[in-house]
Amino acid sequence: MRSRTVREWEVELGESLKAIRLHRNLDHVTLAARAGISVRSLRNLESGNGSSLHTLIEVVRTLGRESWLELIAPVPTVNPLMMTRNASPRQRASKHRCKPHHKRCDESSVSPNGPLWMVWALYRTW
């Protein structure tokens, strides 16, 4: 199955929104007024001619389809890695470790008292 283009997604989404609007027996003027957008913005959205994220969200909310938005970026509730070990949930991201072959790793970032000093010193002499 091939991936859809952005244009194809815009058209398909616009057609879905139009079908819901017609199913609810709403004309462009009524839906646009309820969503707080212009009729032109609604027509552009339904025809797939580009629209703002704001317009999309207002129309989706007005049509009662907020669940669509929740499906785009769901909040993960269970991390499969956490199931394999007895670890507490992550509270913050870990720091990236400095590796001798990276540009960021220079004399100022490797302390002579730190564990990477020997690795860095060996790497420089190699």
Image (cartoon, rainbow, N blue to C red):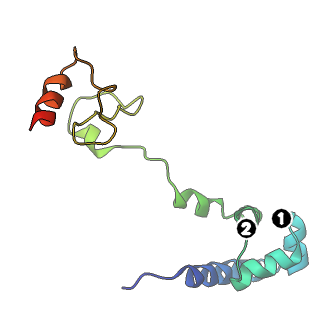
- Please identify the residue farthest to the front as the structure is shown: 125
Q: Amino acid at mark 2?
A: Ser
Q: Is residue 86 left or right of residue 61?
A: left
Q: Percent x, y for residue 100?
A: 22, 36
Q: Are marks 2 and 1 in contact (CB under 8 Å)?
A: no
Q: Nearer the viewer, residue 57 or 34?
A: 57
Q: Is residue 81 left or right of residue 50?
A: left
Residue at the outermost top position: 113
Query: 119 left or right of 51?
Result: left
How packed mark 1 is, by other alpha carbons closer than 10 Å (few <14, some 14-19, many 20 or more), is many
Dot in front, 2 or 1: 2
N-term mark: 2 or 1: 1
What numbered label is drawn on residue 35? Answer: 1
What whole-number distance in Å separates the C-alpha atoms at marks 2 and 1? 13 Å
Which of the image's four quarters has the C terminus? Answer: top left
**Helix, strand or loop at mark 1:** helix
Query: Which residue has dot 2 on it?
Result: 52
Of 92 and 122, the residue lying toward us: 122
Residue 43 appears in which quarter of the rendering?
bottom right
Query: Which residue lies at the image location 66% right of the left edge and 64% below the top edge?
Result: 65
Q: Which image quadrant is residue 82 in?
A: top left
Count of numbered tags? 2
Q: Quadrant of the N terminus?
A: bottom left
Q: Which one is in front, 84 or 21?
A: 84
